[in-house]
Image (cartoon, rainbow, N blue to C red):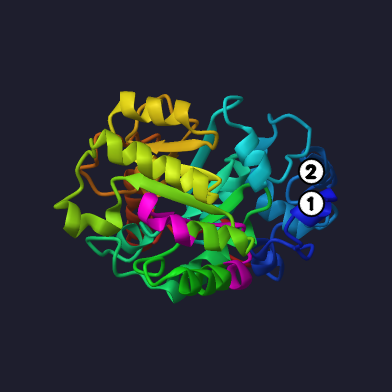
Amino acid sequence: MSQSLNEPQREPRTSAAALRYSEYPREKPGRNQISEIAASFRYTGRLSAIPADSVSATLFIAPLHCRMSAQPSTPPVRMTVPRFVARKGQERLSMVTAYDYATAQLLDLAGLDAILVGDSMSMVVQGHTTTLPVTLDEMIYHAEMVGRAVQHALVIVDLPFPTNHLGPYKAVEFAGRILKEARVQAVKLEGGAEQAEVISALTAAGIPVMAHVGLRPQSVHLLGGYKVQRDEERLLRDAQSAQDAGAFGVVLECIPTPLAQKITAQLQIPTIGIGAGPHCDGQVLVYHDLVGLSEGPLPKFVKSYGNAREEIIRAVQAFREEVQSGAFPDTKQSYS
Ligand code: KIV
C-alpha cells in the first residue's frame, strides 16, 4: 500500500486563528522581521499551509512558533496506527487529551504522539461529576475541532457511554460517524474481554480501536468509585482479549505497577498507562491536570507541569484592574 493511502487526506489549510486576525489593522513590521519569521516557518516545515510571505499570518503565529524553533529541522512524520504500534519496545509514547481547536494545535506543536478526545470532556469541560453524560453528538462536535487542528499526532476519540454496549452493529455505526464526521483516525472504548466482539467488528470495518482496561470511569457506579483495580486474572484476560480481537493499543488505568508491567510484557501492542506506573509503553494525562487548570484535589497519579489556573486568574485580574484604573487601553492599543 502506498504511504499516501495510509495518511488522512486533508485540504491545505490556513490557520483559522491567522485568518481571524488577518483583517485587523496592525503595526507594520520591519522588513527583516518579516523575512526572519517567514524563513523560520519554512525551516520547521510546520504549519506549512500558512503562506510564508503572509505578514498577518506569520505575525500571529510567530510567538508560538518561536518556542518551537529549537526543534530539529526534519519535518515531523504523521503518526499512523502502524507507526504507533511499531513504537512498542522502541520509544515511549505520549498522549494527552484535547477537546478544542486551539488546545489541540498547541499539543500538536509540542510534538505529542497521540491526542485523545476523551470522554473526560464530560467532567473537565462540561462540569459533570462523571464521564457518563457526554453524548455522541457532543463528542463528534469537539473531535471535529481537534481533528481540524492536528497535523502530526494520531487523533483518537472515546466512544461515549453506552455506545459500545449496544452490539457490534451499532458500535460500527457510531464509530463510523466519528471517523466520517470528525475526520480522526481511531476510537477508544472502555472494556476488554466483554468487548471482544465489538473490537473485532470495528477493526473488520477498518476502524482502529484502542481498548481501556483497569479502572473504567464509565463503570464508576458498578465499581463503587474511582478505585485501583487489582484483579490480576481479569486484567490480564481483558488486555489479552482486546489484543486478540484486533485492538492496536490498550489504556491501563489505575492498576498496580507490577501488574501493568506484566501486562505490558505479555502484549505485542502498546500499553498506555494512567496511574499504572512507569513500565507501560506510553503515558496519558488529561490536559487540564497536566497544565494545572484543574481544581484540586487531584488523583495521586497526576503530575501537573504548569499552573495555568493561577496564571489565567492573574492575567484576568490584571486586565480587570487596568480597565478599572483606565490604564488599558493606552496609546499602544489605540488607533490615532
Ligand atoms: O477520557 C479520558 O480522558 C481518558 C483518559 C483518562 C485515558 O479516557
Find the distance from the CA under tag 1 to the CA under tag 2: 6 Å
Can you tell me whether the CB of the residue at mark 1 lies under 8 Å from the nearest atom of ligand 1?
no
Q: Position of residue 155 (x, y in %)?
A: 58, 54
Residue that label 2 marks: 45
- Give the residue type at disc 2: Gly
Q: Is residue 71 left or right of residue 275?
A: right
The boundaries of the magenta stretch are 179-198
Tag 1: Cα neighbours inside 10 Å, few (<14), some, or many (≥20)? some
Residue 304 occupies quadrant: top left
Residue lying furthest left? 224
Q: Position of residue 52 (x, y in %)?
A: 83, 52
Q: Position of residue 256 (x, y in %)?
A: 28, 29
Residue 237 to residue 219: above or below = above
Residue 217 occupies quadrant: bottom left
- Give the residue type at disc 1: Ser
Q: Is residue 255 magenta?
A: no
The mark found on residue 165 in the picture is none
Q: Position of residue 273 (x, y in %)?
A: 40, 36
* Observer-nearest of 290 and 199: 199
User: Where's the C terminus, which quadrant?
Assistant: bottom right
Residue that label 1 marks: 48
Q: Is residue 38 left or right of residue 129?
A: right
* Residue at image point 38% right, 60% down: 119
Can you tell me whether the CB of the residue at mark 2 lies under 8 Å from the nearest atom of ligand 1?
no
Callout 2 secondary element: loop
